[in-house]
Image (tube, rainbow, N blue to C red):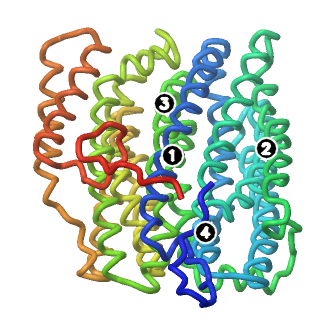
């Protein structure tokens, strides 16, 4: 592990204090490496998750898959709402605090997250009972809720690692969670496990990860939770609009599943759940990639607005290229993805997934702009945008489900995600005109997407269509210079990549 950069020491002089990584030119490279590492780790974890889910969905069948997914998504609502944006705020505050102030923040964040998680699980169990869901769904929510409380504690502890750009450990925890879950699911399938047993997997996995996380962070941060109501209010008082916005955004994403469960039958819910599962897995990617740069955004927003504009611009360009590529490949390969994940019995979910891929692509650039607004403390704008997305999206989903069934729900979620990203970009531009996103590469990306879609006219097998469409897109964006140089410099063997200097 390399030591932090320091200035040169004149002869006979006193060695200066080490330069904080977040204040040094090395921060950008560290964020890129960390972001790539987290995405690569997540891809490996995703392969394990998809493999175990494919076996699980075949084991459960269409109806029980819908029930399993419903319980998982209800707990996911609790996870998002109980976070109240505290993870992002914690990363930002850890990036600028030191000493006892940082320790007090760590302890109260942990206590607050635990209390919110327990309260959230109680509320969602009450909702499950009131909605009249079958008993196994309600019991599943209870046991999965225990796993959520453990996960909340563990994820809160990783805030210190993220703020210090020690993303290798974070990536390790992400992969370990997926690996342990996959092993447990496969073991239960071999033992002919019940629906409830699969929902309980999160409990032993959560215990293992929490223990490992505590050992890694021992001596580096305060880990005893504090339950000081005055301090909790201090945490959310200034960011309350943002906290409500995070809750609204979480409700908006899973609202479609809840409405489909209430307005359609169990088989339709099964199809929609598998489609949403794919989007849910991939939707983590924008947050992982952009979140790696968020500590830099926060420090630059405080100290150097020109640096913030540069960082946001470069991350936007990377997210635009990557987001369009992921959306294109998913739209083309939707039948293949559904066949792998659910088997022939879920074929009706493929068109739903292709539609929702458009919204997934928009979320990549939306994540950049949202992090920009957060670094500027623009909580009011974030709140207004999230509430519009929640209310407008909910009404649109309900209306289109009535008009066009589950296809209407897919169209509504994709459209809402696209509008959400657009509103976030406009809000950032209005907050500071110097932070306007660079749009010079949009035509090249659009041309690449168009050519990629055109390759589907060749009527090739689905897997070949994905490869050819993705290759056509990549060739266009590379030829037209749409891929930022800062990203290409980190590709091993790429022409013009800086050679590593001598070891010191």
Q: Residue at x 28, y 65 (%)?
A: 313
Q: CA distance from mark 2 to mark 1?
A: 19 Å
Q: Residue at x 38, y 38 (%)?
A: 410
Q: CA distance from mark 4 to mark 1?
A: 17 Å
| Image position of 488 (left or right of 233) | left
Q: Which mark is residue 272?
A: 3
Mark toward the start of the polypeptide (2 vs 1): 2
Q: CA distance from mark 3 to mark 1?
A: 19 Å
Image coordinates of residue 93 in percent, x first then y, are: 62, 77
Mark toward the start of the polypeptide (4 vs 1): 4
Image coordinates of residue 267 in percent, x first then y, are: 54, 21
Instruction: Give the camera-side residue of 190 and 412.
Output: 190
Mark toward the start of the polypeptide (2 vs 4): 4
Instruction: Give the camera-side residue of 35 and 121.
Output: 35
Q: Nearer the viewer, mark 4 or mark 1?
A: 4
Task: Give the SS element for disc 3.
Answer: helix
Q: Can you say whether 136 is above or below 436 in the image?
A: above
Q: Can you say whether 376 is above or below 106 in the image?
A: below
In the picture of the structure, the residue carrying the numbered disc 2 is 209
The quadrant in which residue 188 appears is top right
The quadrant in which residue 237 appears is bottom right
Q: Nearer the viewer, mark 2 or mark 3?
A: 2
Q: Residue at x 38, y 51 (%)?
A: 363
Residue at the bottom extreme of this rendering: 13
| Image position of 12 (left or right of 111) | left
Mark toward the start of the polypeptide (2 vs 3): 2
Q: Which mark is residue 284?
A: 1
Mark toward the start of the polypeptide (3 vs 1): 3
Q: Nearer the viewer, mark 3 or mark 1?
A: 1
């Amino acid at each position: 592990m390399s030591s932090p950069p320091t200035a040169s020491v004149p002869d006979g002089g006193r060695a200066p204090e080490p330069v904080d990584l977040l204040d040094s030119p090395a921060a950008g490279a560290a964020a890129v490496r960390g972001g790539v590492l987290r995405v690569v780790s997540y891809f490996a974890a995703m392969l394990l998750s998809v493999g175990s889910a494919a076996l699980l969905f075949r084991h459960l069948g269409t109806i029980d898959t819908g029930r399993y997914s419903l319980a998982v998504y209800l707990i996911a609502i609790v996870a998002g709402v109980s976070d109240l944006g505290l993870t992002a705020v914690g990363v930002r505050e850890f990036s600028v605090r030191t000493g006892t102030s940082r320790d007090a923040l760590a302890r109260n964040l942990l206590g607050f997250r635990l209390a919110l998680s327990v309260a959230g699980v109680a509320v969602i169990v009450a909702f499950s009972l009131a909605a009249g869901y079958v008993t196994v769904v309600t019991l599943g929510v209870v046991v999965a809720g225990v796993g959520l409380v453990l996960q909340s504690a563990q994820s809160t502890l990783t805030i210190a690692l993220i703020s210090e750009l020690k993303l290798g450990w974070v990536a390790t925890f992400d992969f370990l969670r997926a690996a342990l879950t996959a092993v447990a699911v496969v073991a239960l399938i071999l033992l002919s496990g019940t629906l409830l047993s699969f929902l309980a997997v999160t409990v032993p996995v959560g215990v293992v990860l929490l223990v490992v996380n505590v050992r890694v962070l021992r001596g580096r941060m305060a880990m005893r939770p504090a339950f000081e109501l005055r301090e909790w209010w201090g945490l959310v008082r200034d960011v309350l609009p943002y906290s409500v916005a995070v809750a609204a955004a979480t409700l908006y994403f899973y609202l479609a599943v809840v409405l489909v469960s209430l307005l359609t039958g169990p088989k339709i819910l099964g199809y929609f759940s598998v489609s949403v599962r794919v989007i849910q897995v991939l939707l983590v990617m924008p947050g992982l990639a952009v979140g790696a740069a968020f500590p830099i955004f926060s420090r630059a927003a405080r100290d150097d607005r020109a640096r913030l504009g540069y960082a946001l611009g470069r991350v936007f360009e990377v997210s635009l290229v990557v987001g369009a590529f992921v959306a294109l490949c998913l739209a083309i390969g939707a039948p293949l993805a559904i066949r792998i994940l659910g088997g022939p019995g879920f074929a009706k979910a493929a068109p739903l997934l292709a539609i929702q891929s458009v919204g997934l692509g928009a979320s990549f650039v939306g994540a950049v702009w949202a992090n920009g607004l957060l670094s500027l403390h623009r909580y009011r704008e974030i709140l207004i945008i999230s509430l519009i997305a929640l209310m407008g999206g909910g009404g649109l989903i309900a209306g289109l489900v009535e008009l066009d069934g589950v296809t209407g729900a897919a169209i509504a979620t994709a459209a809402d995600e696209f509008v959400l990203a657009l509103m976030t970009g406009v809000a950032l531009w209005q907050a500071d005109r110097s932070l306007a996103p660079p749009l010079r590469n949009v035509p090249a990306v659009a041309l690449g997407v168009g050519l990629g879609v055109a390759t589907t006219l060749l009527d090739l097998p689905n897997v070949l269509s994905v490869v050819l469409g993705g290759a056509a897109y990549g060739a266009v964006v590379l030829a037209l210079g749409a891929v930022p140089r800062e990203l290409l410099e980190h590709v091993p063997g790429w022409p013009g990549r800086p050679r590593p200097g001598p070891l010191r």
